[in-house]
Amino acid sequence: MSSIRGIVKDIIIVATCVAVIWIGLTAYFGAQNPFYVVSSGSMYPELAMHDIIVISGHALFEDVKIGDIIVFDRPKDHDKVIVHRVVAVVDDDPLTLRTKGDNNQNSIVGTDYPITEEEYKGTVIHVIPQVGYITKILQPPINYIIIAVIIGIMVIRQISKNKKALTDQMKTESEIKNYDKSQPNEKMDGDLSWLDNYKNASKDFTTQEKKSTEKLGEEKSKHDIDSLLDDLKRDAKKSKIDDN
């Protein structure tokens, strides 16, 4: 379940990034779709098949000049996007243009003209040669296979990540259990003689202290008796002197 959530999260992140980038590009170039792949040789050698063209929608239709290469919907039924060069202004009100492919002999009615602002998409500002081969390679079923491989890699990556996290968690729990088990064993298996030594030392200290106290008492008593005898001797000697 966590693997599925992780995969969905990755897909959402990728989709969000792509959407943000695409919105930024459309705003920068001023066109709903700034990129097109040349699919015919009508503009050869200026544009070859599989070249990618970048258009700018910021270039206003009324500013288009003869000689500019523009992208527009085919005026006949708007069922196809065409990139041709402007070769003439058919009418000024409303502004109507006529185009022609550089590799074509003549302009084609319903394809090259009449081009009005309604058909106009943008003016070509950049050409990226032959990169459009990638889009040809990515046609079905190759694109589906690549998508499946990418999703498979994401699944494997997420499963491996979860498996590693689970392994680390189990390892940590095992180490904690082993540590907890080792603590009582160390206490039980340890040398407890220090406790007996402590008890004996305490007993010896108490006995020694008692003996020291008794000895001190005896010495004090003896000292008091000697002092008393000395006092008696001095008194007797003094009395004898006084009698004389």
Image (cartoon, grey):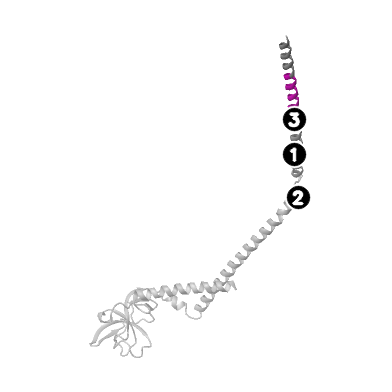
Q: Is residue 99 left or right of residue 201?
A: left
Closer-to-camera residue (98/213):
213
Prevalent SS, magenta region: helix
Q: Separation of disc 1 and disc 3 at Cα?
A: 24 Å
Closer-to-camera residue (220/82):
220
Q: Separation of disc 2 and disc 3 at Cα?
A: 47 Å
Q: Does residue 240 lie above or below 41 as drawn?
A: above
Q: Indicate which disc residue 189 carries.
A: 2
Q: Is mark 3 on a helix, strand or loop?
A: helix
Image coordinates of residue 94 in percent, x first then y, are 25, 88
Circles 2 and 3: CB distance less than 8 Å?
no
**Between disc 2 and disc 3, whose residue precedes?**
2
Hey, which quadrant is residue 164 in on the image?
bottom right
Q: Is residue 62 left or right of residue 2?
A: left
Q: What stretch is highlighted in magenta?
A: 217-231
Circles 1 and 3: CB distance less than 8 Å?
no
Circle 1: residue type: Ala
Q: Indicate which disc residue 201 carries.
A: 1
Q: Is mark 1 on a helix, strand or loop?
A: helix
Nearer the observer: mark 1 or 3; the answer is 3
Q: Does residue 183 lie above or below 87 as drawn?
A: above
Residue at x 72%, y 19% (from the top left corner): 231
